[in-house]
Image (spheres, helix red, strand yellow):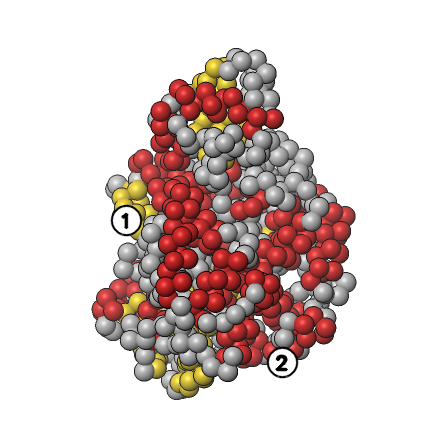
Amino acid sequence: MTELPPVYGGEILHVHLDSGETDVEAIDPRDARRFLGGNGLAAKAVAEHVPADAGPLDPENVVVFAVGPMNATPFQSTSRGVVGFVSPMTDGFFDSTFGGTFPRAQKTTGFEAVVLHGAAPEQSYVSVHEDGAEVVPAGDLAGLDTYETCGAVRERERGEDTHVAAVGPAGEALVRYACLLHEGRDREGVAGRGGSGAVLGAKNVKAVAVTEGSFEPELAAEDDLRELAVGRTGQLMAETEMLQEYGTSGLVNPINEMGKLGQRNNQYEQTTEAAAEAISGETLAADYVTEHTTCANCAVRCGKHVTVEGDGVTDAKIPEFESLFGTATMQEVYDVERVMKANDLCDRLGMDTISWGVTVAFARECHEQGLLDADTPGVAFADGDSQRLEFGDAEGLVALATATADREGVGDALAGGSFEIAASLPGDDAERYLHGAKGLEFAAHSPRGLKGMSIGYATSTRGGSHHDTRPTRQYGGEHDETTAGTAEFAARSQHFTALGDSLTQCRFVSESGWGVEVNDRYRDAVNAATGWDLTTDEVERIGERVYNVERAINVERGVADRESDTLPHRVLHEPIPDGPAEGMHCPPGELAAMLDEYYAFRGWSDDGRPTAATLERLDIADVVG
Amino acid sequence: MRIRVRAFATLRDHLGAREVEVTVDEDASVRAALAALEADYPGLDGELLVDDRVPSTVTVLRNGRRVSADEPGSVALSAGDELVLAPPVTGG
């Protein structure tokens, strides 16, 4: 336990954007065993370096790019990276993951994490390589879209050996949910949620580039790990057939069929068969997909490119299921070509399609209710904005994407996200139409129709994220319609995802190939990679430890307690009106009872704070005590 | 009685059609309908039932409600029911 396993590159690179100076921190072997990597290292870095009173867009915030110990090894699809920061959306800790080839390239530099501190004096990009990093002034990149930025930075660095994650115009304009897009050799990776693009925009960082290095991770028991991975391949490939052929867009039809797919700002949760089919993965595959794409070291190839002839959408990233929820069903827009156009614009401008889409849907309902109009105090309206805020207006949807990034007309309000709009409108009526938690708009998985998501979203450290508590088992019939044992399920699912994001293993590969909860297979893989002798319980404790660090950060920042562990009005008070899930919602008493169980299971106070005893039990009192 | 069956994604590929009707006895179970589909459509042979269970590669919905993978034989069908065959529904 005194030496760091050689599967780790061994170092954390700190880049001080103000001065361009760097310093290198050796990873403490104890920290590797406590936090594993990726999500865990990012949470620890944020806890250590960001003062509790620092705002998300202040220079004191950091942005951490972290990879997992088994990245660039034969272990399947541990090719993702994590971006960790304090979020402009939630004002709490956030980690957003992305795929492609950037994370693997980072691993080969030997830097398991790169931490960006401060703010650059002028617009720049950060060039990371195995010898360190430079902050490169690049004012001429201003205004370029994400793809253009990736291409321009690659040209200035080492071409195809350089892998770039870029901020788009939305990040430069500090749109609060601005994201990062990485254009890999084959497919894009998007760190979509939480506003990492806005944080980098505030730091004057237009892109982060990583040039491949020479570090090669050494596995403690390579043959054992290969055997484990090969043993899971059959199941993995069988269970991901849909992803291989249709991508996540293949989820539209079945989840709509269950009556758990939000429509019209979640006023109802099932559209017609024809409408769902029009925006489905089946339609996209038949008429628009031009090629399959994949991340490094992944056979599933869930990525796709789509082309809309004559519409300026050429080999664009396919809209993911979550994006189809945000930009299609929540808008009552089933014109798939306009939806693809809106999604491509979001990718190029650098905006989270979920938060943007749900924010537009929220604004459309506020407009419908007479709460948001040209005469609303403090809100700018351009000519045509009233029409653009009508549900079903596909052209308006496309126009609002550009308006948001440009902060033109009502786009300036949309750039703040739905919670900021609700807070700015007179009275509290608008809050009735919010669809999110802790400032972050919900992903596609129904907080009314899936009980595990009710308590999962309410307690999520990231707010409305579907990568804290996972919906997958709920769609399989577990904890979807009962509260019995559901609080514990939600908490342990959060351990599972925090562990997975610390391994930086793709969730699809993980769930389909290795299992939907922490099990002996994950234990064996971690031990084979590191040479440790962890038990399965100890492996799950890593996830629990990381989650408690995140929670403690948020408690310290004043954004996490029982009062904030809540759900929006519609979820608490308005049952699903029709369809197979008719009547489902999460009444306040039901949520309160689940919170009691959740806090007790976690060893938190009645107000939702990790107790000193819990921090000691998890060996994190030195980090967040 | 005739039961409307719709299929999504790769199950649609295996079925060879977006939707079909399958004929089963009155009071037949979902298991019986799945067996009839396997018999009628060669692309589905061995896909829907393994030892009388629905395999993990398939999700079966009856009127939008998930049918237990362990007990498709215990779920009775009624006239007007609709079945959906879908791949595993994951979390996106």
Picture mark count: 2
Q: Give left or right: position of A405 versus A163.
A: right
Residue at horizontal 56 percent and vertical 29 percent from the top: B72
Q: Quadrant of the C terminus of chain A?
A: bottom right
Residue B81, percent from left and from top: 55, 21
Crowding near pointer 1: few (<14 within 10 Å), some, many (20+)? Answer: some
Quadrant hosting residue A542? bottom right
Q: In this picture, is A425 found above or below B53?
A: below
Q: In this picture, is A58 found above or below A547?
A: below
The residue lying toward the viewer, choosing from A58 and A258, is: A258
Residue at horizontal 38 percent and vertical 47 percent from the top: A234
The subunit letter for the residue under badge 1 reads A
Residue A492, percent from left and from top: 61, 57
Q: Would you name the residue on which mark 2 appears?
A: A622
Residue A391, percent from left and from top: 51, 39
Same chain, labels 1 and 2: yes
Quadrant hosting residue A82? bottom left
Q: Would you name the residue on which mark 1 appears?
A: A315
SS for tag 1?
strand
Residue at horizontal 53 percent and vertical 13 percent from the top: B25
The subunit letter for the residue under badge 2 reads A
Crowding near pointer 2: few (<14 within 10 Å), some, many (20+)? Answer: few
Residue A63, percent from left and from top: 47, 72
The residue lying toward the viewer, choosing from A392 and A454, is: A454
| Amino acid marked by disc 1 | Asp
Mark 1 and mark 2 lie on one chain; the one further toward the N terminus is 1
Q: Give left or right: position of A152 versus A89.
A: left
The residue lying toward the viewer, choosing from A161 and A617, is: A617
| Amino acid marked by disc 2 | Asp
- Residue A74's tag is none
Q: In this picture, is A609 found above or below A593?
A: below
Residue at horizontal 56 percent and vertical 62 percent from the top: A536
